[in-house]
Structures are given as C-alpha cells and as structure tokens.
Amino acid sequence: MDLKDKVILITGASSGIGKAVALALSHGHNRIVITARRKELLSDVAETIQKNGSEALAINGDALDAEQAASIVQQAVLRFGHIDIALLNIGAGPSLSISTASPGDIKQNMRVNYDTMINFFCPLVQQMKAQDSGGIIANTNSLAGFLGLPTQGQYSAAKAACRIFLDTARIELKQYNIRVLTICPGFVITERNKQPGIPASFTMSLDEAARHILKALKSESKEYLFPTRLKLAIMLPRFLPRFATESILSQFLRS
Ligand SMILES: NC(=O)c1ccc[n+]([C@@H]2O[C@H](COP(=O)([O-])OP(=O)(O)OC[C@H]3O[C@@H](n4cnc5c(N)ncnc54)[C@H](OP(=O)(O)O)[C@@H]3O)[C@@H](O)[C@H]2O)c1
C-alpha cells in the first residue's frame, strides 16, 4: 500500500521504534493516530508529526485494558472516518533468568507483548471488516520469536505466540481484504535498550529499523525479517541438530 494520505494507527508510539515509524510516516501527508501511556512524550511526537505536514491524534491509554484499546480505535474512526493501517507495536523484552523468575514475572511479559496486541487486534478487525478497502494490521514482532534465546525465554515465547496467532488470522481475514503482516526486527538501538555486548554488525539504528518497517508496510510482506545477516543467523539453527543449537545459544549466557 502506498504510504501517503492514509489513516494510520501506531501503538507504542511514545518512544523507540513506534515513534521512529510515526515520524518517518509523517512526511507523507498522512493522518496518524498515536497511542501509549506517557502523555507528554506522545504530545511531543504529535507536534513533530504536524510540523512535518501530517495530521496527528494522540490518545494516551493503557493497552493492557481491552476497553481502553477498543475506545482508542473508536476515537480514531470518529476523527478520521476509517483506519487504513495499524501497526501494533507495543512490547518489551527485559532479560529474565528462569532459575529465579516467578510465574508472575514470566506471565507479565506475555501480557505486555501478546495481550496488548490482541486488545487492539479484535476491535480493528471489526472496523476493517466494515471498510470496503479492508486494511492492514501489522505487528512489530521480533527475530527473538523464532528461537528460545537464553535470558529471553518469556519474550521469545510471547513473540512466537503473536506470530502463530497472526498466521491464522492472515488466512481467516483474507476474505475481508484485511492483510496481516508480521514484521520481525533484530536488535535495534533505542533509548531504553543500549544493547551492551552485542556485535555492532548486528545492531540497527532507529532510522534504519523505521525504513525497513515502511518497506514492509508498503510491500505488504506477510512476514518481513531484518536485518538479513541476523535473519540468516537466526534461521540457521533450524537446520542444525538440537545439541549444536543449544551449544551456540549457550554462548549468550557466557557473554
Ligand atoms: N528494540 C529492539 O531491539 C527490538 C527488536 C525487535 C523487536 N522489538 C519490538 O519493537 C517494539 C517496540 O519496542 P522498542 O524497542 O521501541 O521499545 P520502547 O521504546 O520501550 O517502546 C515500547 C512502546 O510501547 C509502549 N507501551 C508499553 N506498554 C504499554 C501499555 N501497557 N500500554 C500502552 N503502551 C505501552 C511504550 O509507551 P509508554 O511507556 O508511554 O506506555 C512505548 O511507546 C516492541 O514490540 C519490541 O518487542 C524491539
């Protein structure tokens, strides 16, 4: 889909990748609805979007609350009439050691990555089903969702759950012209996440990540994995015996 003159909802747009994508899209005369909890950061993003020539609607809310998420979709439609594209981007992957984690620690990460996506996904489907042109629902997933990474078990599991759900949704929603995209970045350097110890050749700037995400939205790639080098490194263990994969991944614990 051409990324000009569109109504675009981005969740988790107060910082990091969501903010970078919102600003990259703001040069295309779009109408951009941004949401997250931190109101002031969201207002700053909205101001920049408007300076860059797009319209902005900032709505703060907690995506863990399904009613708030549904209301944000409703407010976006009230203001702009429809939604062409939604990027469901909320998520986090803090390190967690399974040897000391509580059930709550592990399940909270499923809530932050999976529940927040589902809380927006369902009202968006109802909205886009009613639109002649359907729409695009994309998720900022992760390459971490393809492997059980040490210290990231809860995150890898949550992103894998999102990806598998989206695989089914893509098939079921095709009849309504709703296109479901899974976008899987590797390591992106954000304010919250400075990534010490990760080889520089594997990390990406926010601008680079945003460029890839715009490319994925434009081309409507069903599953878009980037950057290529890390994508290949993540895919390789699928063809190795399990003991070899575990030996390679164990290096993460020693670094
Ligand atoms: N950075 C990476 O290396 C990387 C790699 C692959 C995938 N990803 C994925 O990219 C996405 C964005 O991550 P990021 O690195 O850009 O992190 P980030 O800067 O922490 O962004 C997360 C966004 O989600 C919002 N958010 C969190 N919980 C929320 C809630 N309950 N309700 C509403 N908004 C909420 C945050 O805003 P508030 O705190 O203001 O609510 C923030 O805007 C995530 O899904 C992450 O898993 C990141």
Image (cartoon, helix red, strand yellow):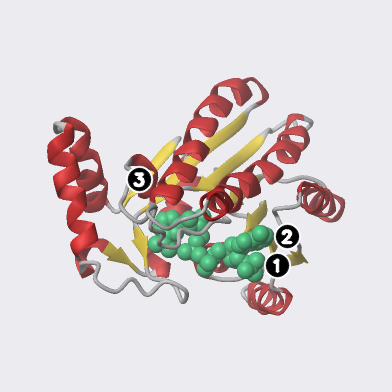
> For disc 3, does the CB lie below 8 Å from ligand 1?
no
In the shown orientation, is residue 119 left or right of residue 107? Answer: right
Residue at the (36%, 49%) spot, across then down: 144
Circle 1 residue: 37
Residue 75 sits above or below residue 160 on the image: below
**Regarding mark 2 in the picture, which secondary structure is present there?**
loop
In the shown orientation, is residue 75 left or right of residue 26? Answer: right
Q: Which amino acid does label 3 sit on?
A: Leu
**Regarding mark 3 in the picture, which secondary structure is present there?**
strand
Q: Which amino acid does label 2 sit on?
A: Asp
Alpha carbon separation for disc pair 2 and 1: 6 Å
In this rendering, does residue 148 appear at all? Answer: yes
In the shown orientation, is residue 240 left or right of residue 112? Answer: left
Which quarter of the image is occupied by the C terminus? bottom left
> For disc 1, does the CB lie below 8 Å from ligand 1?
yes
Residue 62: which disc?
2
Of badges 1 and 3, nearer the viewer stands 1
**Regarding mark 1 in the picture, which secondary structure is present there?**
loop
Query: Are circles 2 and 1 on residues that touch, CB within 8 Å?
Result: yes
> For disc 2, does the CB lie below 8 Å from ligand 1?
yes
Residue 225: which disc?
3
Residue 169: image location, x then y, percent: 58, 28
Which circle's residue, 2 or 1, is located before the other in the chain? 1
Residue 160: image location, x then y, percent: 44, 39
Residue 206: image location, x then y, percent: 42, 68
Which quarter of the image is occupied by the N terminus? top right
Which circle's residue, 3 or 2, is located before the other in the chain? 2
